[in-house]
Amino acid sequence: MTRNSTIWGGILILLGFLLLLNSLRINLFHLVVPVALMVLGAWIVYRKTRPDEPRRGTTQYTYNSDQGVYTATVTSDAGTTRASATVHTTGQSSEAGQRMNEEARVFGDKVKYSKFLGDMFINCENVNLQNVEISIFIGDLEINLAGGKLHPGLNRMIVSGFLGDCLVLIPKDMPVHVHCSGFIGDVELLGKRGSGFGNTMDSQTPEYDAATAKIYIAVNNFIGDIRVFRV
């Protein structure tokens, strides 16, 4: 069963449960809110206790421009090292299965990506990065800025998510200032790390201030991890 079909199945079960409670004249607020808090707490505990949790170590991304792929190598706090799946930057395939690049909507100089439910993969090759907005409600988000076009001056990318992890991959030659804000989840930003509640971090590359073409990226996520790496 695919991840999307699992999500849709869960939504149908939840809607049926809510309709049943309503037909039985049970107060939804008094029942659903405590259950939602328990589910959220269980989700947080589960994420923190997974034995293969890669965020308990250091992640190093490398990019092969000839093959158009990047590989993540995760070193745990105990010193053991493993490599994750090698992912094609075209978004067509990976060891995790088929993935398609999201289509953008263009309004003048503004580029917008949006999705309500499901994972998103955004390949920014040949994309105008002057003014980009990305929003997702439920699902994991991956953004690869390799090959993106910077205009002279300041370029901007605003990323918003509600529930799901966010991964941003930035080319090593791209001058960037990144602001990350997460309510619940870990944040790993250009070598800086934070965990728990209410994480806010800023970091920029050494060449950012003097660069004639650069990009400011703001990543705001309510529940989920935020990871930003140079590749």
Image (tube, helix red, strand yellow):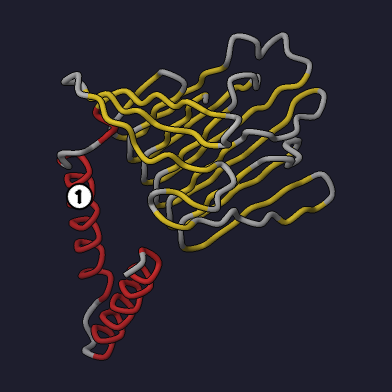
Q: Residue at x 22, y 69 (%)?
A: 30
**Residue occupied by mark 1:** 41
Q: Residue at x 80, y 23 (%)?
A: 153
Q: Residues within 10 Å of mark 1 (few under 14, many from 20)?
A: few
Relative image position of residue 158 (x, y in whole percent): 61, 40
Q: Is residue 204 left or right of residue 111?
A: left
State the residue in front, 197 or 8. Answer: 8
Q: Is residue 59 left or right of residue 90?
A: left
Q: Is residue 137 left or right of residue 110?
A: left
Q: How many marks?
A: 1
* Residue 202, above or below 71: above
State the residue in front, 146 or 83. Answer: 83
Q: Is residue 159 left or right of residue 79?
A: right
Relative image position of residue 37 (x, y in whole percent): 23, 56
Residue at the outermost bottom position: 23
Relative image position of residue 201 (x, y in whole percent): 45, 24
* Residue 224, above or below 174: below
Res 170 → quadrant: top right
Quadrant holding the N terminus: bottom left
Tell me the amino acid under the disc marked 1: Gly
* Residue 50, above or below 30: above
The secondary structure type at the circle numbered 1 is: helix
Q: Residue at x 52, y 18 (%)?
A: 203
